[in-house]
Image (cartoon, rainbow, N blue to C red):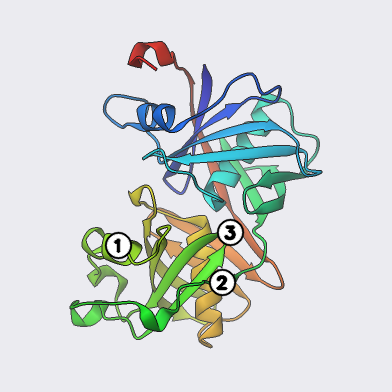
Amino acid sequence: MKLTKHHGLANDFLVMIDIDSTSAINPDLARAVCDRRAGVGADGLIRVSGGSAGANFTMELLNSDGSFAEMSGNGMRCLAQAVAMSGHEPGPSYTVATAGGVREVRHRVGNRPGESWVSVDMGPTSASSVRSDSLSHGTVPAGAAPMKTATIDIANPHVVMLVDDVESVDVGALGPTYESQFAAGANVEWVEPIDRGAIKMRVWERGVGITQACGTGACASARAAHDWGLVDETVMVRMPGGSVEVHLDDVVTLTGPAAYIATVDFDPDLLGL
């Protein structure tokens, strides 16, 4: 089984190009291959197959714990780079069917070896079915106490909290407590405004845990910050792994890098799969 490994601001993915749909992925495979000690290591496993729903390609994404994910902004950028490297790219702009709907991708080669820059139409945001005022926050340090909270869906669910100091947030301790308040789990983001054009963000990702960056989380955070009147329509979202640009309109556009790491020949039989 041939996989390529990529990362979007240190949020890393293993990508399988399977245009003819000859190989399947499943939770056991995702857990095994994403394991950072006994496997290859990644935050998620992506399978790219032939088009559906009128799109050029179809994306299937499993988190490192084997759970299903509707969408990933960083994963889509890694997918775009893998598609380009495979020789299947139909042009600089094309469409990908995801569980959250069809998304347009625009890819260009970056300025450094192994680098791509990708813009993704992330679709519209919507209010989550979970009300922000129903969430329990518990006791947190002063700098991490949420001043405002929003629950937002961008194909997958998010809870976004405005805090004084994102560095004071114990993401590993607080993330699971918020995620558990959603029936299907949720991604959790803490944001701190910098100016009208930038925010800081830290994230707990559903099915993965602490990650260095989250594309859908950046989009949800920018939307929340804009709704709170803190930022303009174009926002740089600064995360531990680096920055992405989010442009807010009827749909949200995410632009950022993807980096190629390695090509892996993985034999599932070695792990008894």
Residue 219 in view of the camera? yes
Q: Nearer the viewer, residue 198 or 155?
A: 155
Which residue corresponds to the image point at 70% horizontal and 52% vertical from the top-left?
103
Q: Position of residue 28 (x, y in %)?
A: 40, 28
Mark 2–mark 1 Cα distance, whole angstroms, equals 24 Å
Disc number at residue 67?
none
Q: Residue 7 appears at what percent x and percent y?
A: 48, 41
Which is more foreground, mark 2 or mark 1? 1
Label disc, if present, on residue 235 of the rendered structure? 2
Amino acid found under the numbered disc labelled 3 = Ala
Residue shown at 45%/17% (left/top)? 266
Query: What amino acid type is highlighted by mark number 2?
Result: Val
Name the residue beneath numbered marker 1: 175
Please report the residue visible at 32 percent of the width from the left and 31 percent of the height from the top: 35
Question: Which quadrant holds the C terminus?
Answer: top left
In the figure, 174 relative to 2: above or below? below
Location of mark 3 (residue)? 155
Q: In the drawing, does residue 105 fall left or right of residue 176? A: right
Q: What SS does tag 1 mark?
A: helix
Q: Mark 2 touching mark 1, by CB under 8 A?
A: no
Mark found first going from the N terminus, 3 or 1: 3
Compare marks 2 and 1 and give the one earlier in the sequence.
1
Q: Is residue 2 above or below residue 33?
A: above
Q: CA distance from mark 3 to mark 2?
A: 20 Å
Q: Is residue 26 above or below residue 236?
A: above
Element on which disc 2 rests? strand
State which tag comes first along the sequence, 3 or 2: 3
